[in-house]
Image: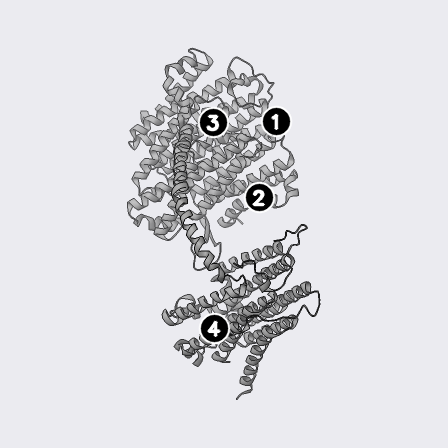
Amino acid sequence: MKAETIAFFILCLGLVASSIAVVISKHLLRSAIFLALSLLLTAIFYISFGAELLAGVQILLYAGGVITLIVFVILLTERIEMKKLEETHRGAIPALLASSLVFFILVYFTWTSPKVQSLAKSPSSSTFGISKTLSENLFQEWVLPFEVLSLLLLAAIIGALVLARRERKEKEI
Amino acid sequence: MFDPQTLLLSVLLPPFISFALNGLIPPLRKSKYAAALAIFSVFISTLASLILLIKRPGGELIFEWIPAKLFSPFLFGFFLDPFSIVMFFIVSLVALIVQVYSLGYMSEENPSGLGRYYTFHSLFAFSMLGFVASSSLLQIYIFWELVGLCSYLLIGFWYYKPEASRAAVKAFWVTRFGDVGFAIGMVILWGATGTFFLSELFVKAPELPTAYLSLCMLLIFFGAMGKSAQFPLHVWLPDAMEGPTPVSALIHAATMVVAGVYLVIRLFPLFQFTPEVLSFVIWIGSITALIGAALALIQEDIKRILAYSTVSQIGYMMAVAGAGAKSIAFFHLFTHAFFKALLFLAAGSIIHAISTNNIWQMGRLSKRMPQTTILFLIGALALSGIFPFSGHFSKDEILVWMHVKGFRIHFFILLFTAFLTALYMFRTFFIVFMGDKEAKQHPHESPWVMTLPMWILGLLALIAGFPKESLFKFLGHDSESYHSYIAYLPLSVSILGIMTAWSIYQMKLFKPSNVAEALSPITSALEKKLWLDDIYEWFYRGILDGLAYLCGWFDRYIVDGIVNATSWYIKQASSQLREIQTGRIQDYLYGIIAALLLLIWLSLGVFPVKDRINEEIVKPKDHIQAPSQYLEGEK
Amino acid sequence: MSLYPTLWAAFLMFSLGLFGVLSRRHLVAIIMGIELMFNASNLALVTIGWAYGVITGQIIALFAIAITVSEVAVGLALFLLVERVRKTVYADETNLMKG
């Protein structure tokens, strides 16, 4: 086995392990940290698949922005009392059954699909990930979705502001 | 420097920049510089369009509004051809003159109102210029609606006056009613040909079945009828006179209302394949000309007289455009823009001086306001078609064309309208400026900032007819001169009209009321505006209310009955079903998971998705290039 | 780099995220589970795009990231609202919809 392959499997294992840690950790902040870890590992995957720009976006937006936001919100609401940060599961067994069913079905279909098999045998593995190609496609072929998405982001900003704003007189729902 | 595209942009962009700056920066809008900015921007446009008129280049400017490969509607473009160049000149020049004039007319407005006024004016100038040069139907529609919006905003400029805001809404609704036809026709045409671009449409549309094309063109003409105030959709234009008078001069006389005529001219290559629609256009135009002139005869409000006169003159243009002479229609549009704007500005000058619109409260103004009198006279003579004023040439051309091409009935209608035109115009003139009773107020001549623009327009109204031959040559119209007795008929009919007006209203040879009694059925019909407003109201009250009542009954007893019965059963059933609602989010998610599994099963097992990635969505060799190729390209 | 292990890692990540969404009680933990699922689908998109040799996978992943960010913003704002109004942070205590 080449060193590259070993590193790749270690990466895969790290990804899965950190994902497990996200969902079973009793401590919410620890969950968030593991989520950041798994997102960073995904970024490494992106780099190895030739998607440098995506990796950058992943690190900046996800690991940087989203995780910070989540940690902020946790600290904002939990008032740093350790007993309130305790996190439990409810209905774990049906959840486990359902999610493993999804997992096995996905694996089954990709394993038996001839198309995926042929792809796995001979991936085209072209390294086209330079940002120039991506942005040229983005701003020509995909420009309409892009513009629509910018509208969505605007709506999300306004919506988040409106929702999170603290009104002077709060009505009890 | 002077290549066509730069000139095109320097016509279009300055008003837009002025609008954007004034619109987005309130301190600027509320300052006195707003007006200066607007006037300066339209001045640049005028200069650029003057250069265009001298150099007469052709050319187009097409750009991708949203650079996507999949959608053709997002291509935008402007193009220069003889019609758009001349129209540029008309629009920008009249806009410039009117905006300068407004400085005097609106001087009592407070600064923020004035800023708003000029902001709307800039937007109007931009959208009208954009409309003129648009090269795709969709873009024409967009600018068409924009000028409609400006018209609405400016009619309702004094929105605190109830009549003004009602008139604005009425104008908006009636024109919108026509625009529905335009939109539907446009979309049908697009559905059949797959393009909005005029040049492509002209190639593809003639191949469509004639009935299909006729339907499209009829619907599109419906929009033109609304915008150009053609019978029976003309009812909004007289009410639109509630707006400031300079607005009426610019929008409701010279530029926006003729947009419908311009649209017919622009789409003439399509209209010519649909003779039925063209004959409809002629009929509508002739009837509108006659009715407009007849209604103008009995009005007492000076602006309404001019408004009905505009309706009537646009009827002339429509009729001759329908008869196949788009260049003659355009020529009349050209001369009409100047003399009708002049008439409105002169009327505005009077209104500014004595603050009333009623002609019976005016009189002997020729002593107090000599300049305005001369200018109004020039306009009236031009409108009546007296040699050598500009209206003479264009109206002559129209009537001769109608005669030569064998539209006999229309010819006589229009000839009679020419008589009426002279009659109502000089009725107004004699009552307002001559007469024997003095106006109660003490009118004074308007300041130079109002008279100077009027003089320029007066000069244009005087000379605009002379470059007829070169204009026709430029527009590509083979102007044959028909030297026959027909050419003298319009002139003599107009002189007859003036004499009649003179004998009735100046010399009092016979009383107007006697004439009115003699023709009482017609007069009473005219006084009721041919009952059109009543018909519309009756239609609305009677039919719509009746329909609404029926619907209400149906809704209350039949629909509600069914709904109530259904709801009772559902209530019973749901009290059994409520047990599965736990209220816990995650329990509901299991439903989503079941759906997800079903989807996976369907898409992979039962209906396998065709592998299209390499075929249709993205072609790798087009879109994905190896980095080395880029490096080579950049060297 | 190989296709199957990466895809399966992504699937596993997706299922773990699903498990988190289904079973966690804390609302922020549920949001984190959703993040995990989003991330897994992005990874699968990029991987498949890489195997096909097309850039579409990356572009859709980019869009998905933007959508995720808006989702997180709105989701956390909603969470703050729920926390303030209902005085709870647990999903099973916000059961107004209980029939």
What is the spatial separation of the Cα atoms under label 4 and label 2, in whole angstroms? Answer: 58 Å
Q: Which residue is mark 1?
A: B447
Q: Which mark is residue B306?
A: 3
Q: Which label lies toward us, 4 or 2?
A: 4
Sort mark 2 into few (<14), some (14-19) or many (20+) by Cα contacts within 10 Å. Answer: many
Residue B27 can be seen, yes or no: yes
Q: Which label lies toward us, 2 or 1?
A: 2
Q: Are marks 2 and 1 on the same chain?
A: yes
Residue type, label 3: Leu
Q: Which label lies toward us, 1 or 4?
A: 4
Give the residue displayed 38% in from the left and 43% down from the top.
Answer: B558
Asked if marks 2 and 1 touch (Cβ < 8 Å), the reply is no
Give the residue displayed 56% in from the left and 81% down from the top.
Answer: A13
Q: Which mark is residue B19?
A: 2
* Image location (x, y in percent) of residue B61: 47, 51
Label located before the other in sequence (3 or 2):
2
Q: Are marks 1 and 3 on the same chain?
A: yes
Local secondary structure at mark 1: loop
Q: Which label lies toward us, 3 or 4?
A: 4
What is the spatial separation of the Cα atoms under label 2 and label 1, in whole angstroms? Answer: 27 Å
* Image location (x, y in percent) of residue B200: 37, 51
Residue type, label 4: Val
Q: Which residue is mark 4?
A: A102
